[in-house]
Amino acid sequence: MSHVFHRSLTQDYPTAIKGEGPYLIDDQGRRYLDACGGAAVSCLGHSDTAVTEAIREQVGKVAYAHTAFFTTEPMEALADFLVERAPAGLESVYFVSGGSEAMEAALKLARQYFIEIGQPRRRHLIARRQSYHGNTLGALATGGNAWRRQQFEPLLIDVSHVSPCYAYRGLQEGETPEAYAVRLADELEAEILHLGAENVMAFVAEPVVGATMGAVPAVPGYFKRVREVCDRHGILLILDEVMCGMGRTGTLFAAEQEGITADLITIAKGLGAGYQPIGATLVSRRIRDAIASGSGFFQHGHTYIGHATACAAALAVQTTIQQRDLLPRVCELGEGLQRRLTERFGEHPHIGDIRGRGLFQGLELVADRATKTAFDPERKVNARVKQAAMQAGLMCYPMGGTIDGRLGDHILLAPPFILEESHLDEIVDKLDIALRSALGSR
Ligand code: PLP
């Protein structure tokens, strides 16, 4: 029996012993094409030599220096790299060890900002239904994914959840995407007015929703309107780019494609590409200045914040992506993947929607295409697809969101940026095998 407390205590896992580009290999010699980067993490694939060398070099110099005593070269250089490329106004970076920690830092920074500027009543958050922002208690309270929250209710902080921007299910008959964006922004504004704007601190959203919906971008104009609503009421906008950021959608920050900036942006997964655990919260000038000219201290230390080796690894990942000019490639490969998925599964009786941006693509699985009825959760469709895909030698990320209070199913594809065209065919072929095995032949 394994002495590891695995998340699932009823499942056996193959042992990964080697990585080769976009493949992971287990101790039986089976090869798995990593079409989801684990959880949208491994954007450079596995065993990249430049990153391996950067880690080796940093460990040989300073593996770790506690941030209560020192700053380090890789931490400073990584902050410079990110700020130079970040949406306007985001001028400093708080480094942590992952996405949930980045969200916790963002929530506490938002709260501290309002305390420092003398508006302590602003403590209420607004997020969206069907969202996921991490598993620590603050981040879990923020997310609107009922399935992940239910065992831990009541959660520690008060959060209202408004509708997600989800064209496949949310767009009403005859409604244009523009009108849909206006309706959703109005809903957000109504919630703010209902709570009293003087009590609300921030609105939190993922520019392209990953884990809970399967790569759902917002309709054009949605985020611009959301930004306007936040500004009108003095509310901070927190964009969670933990999954969709760092080039995954074809631009370094997903917000760039929405033409907006945020007060806080969280990043993680693709930042270190899995070579080291790292996340970060990008902080706007006005929040930093308010704290700097107020208490001067952010009470949020963790032992491993700003870890020198993690920062060196992330810097090597990001400079490699830049030197190899991989972001235009993400757009090209993403278009190729979406085209192949549509050709193969566009008429599939159990695939209701194919959507995404860049190398962040999702397929929504439905029992009935015409009515968009989700599968009965008892059928555990997403777990079966995952298992069948692993048997076919493919890693994909099938998950359940919640649709009208019930669990729905989708598959998320988030492969490394280093793929060849032939890997796109391999993904679609193996996914086809997995779907036939999990759902029966068409
Ligand atoms: N935010 C989003 C959008 C995520 O997708 C995730 C993880 O999937 C998190 C936050 C939490 O990140 P982590 O698992 O690194 O704590």
Image: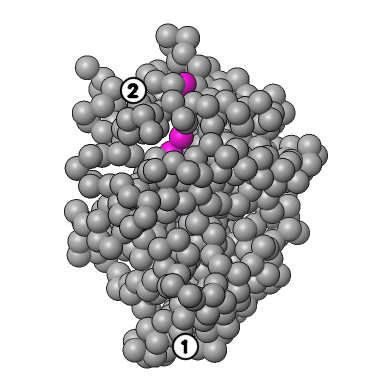
The x, y position of residue 89, in whole percent, is 68, 71
Q: Earlier in the sequence, mark 1 or mark 2?
A: 2
- Under mark 1, the amino acid is Gly
SS type, badge 1: loop
Q: Which residues are magenta?
A: 393-397
Q: Quadrant location of the N terminus? A: top left
The residue at 60%/62% (across/down) is 282
Q: Residues within 10 Å of mark 2 (few under 14, many from 20)?
A: few
Q: Height in image: 240 above or below 294?
A: above
Whether residue 434 can be seen here:
yes
Give the residue at the far top of this rendering: 28
Q: Is residue 157 left or right of residue 421?
A: left
For disc 1, the neighbor class at 10 Å (few under 14, some 14 to 19, many from 20) is few
Please identify the quarter of the rendering in which residue 155 is found.
bottom left
The answer to whether the residues at label 1 and label 2 have Cβ atoms under 8 Å apart is: no
Please name the residue that numbered disc 1 is placed on: 118
Magenta stretch encompasses residue 6: no
- Amino acid identity at mark 2: Tyr
Q: Secondary structure at mark 2?
A: loop
Where does residue 83 sit, x and y in percent of width and height? 71, 60
Is residue 120 among the parts visible in the rendering?
A: no
Horizontal side, residue 434 vs residue 418: left or right: left
Q: At x 56% / y 23%, what residue is drawn? A: 23
Please tell me which residue lies in front, 108 or 371: 371
Mark on residue 13? 2
Magenta residues, dominant SS class: strand
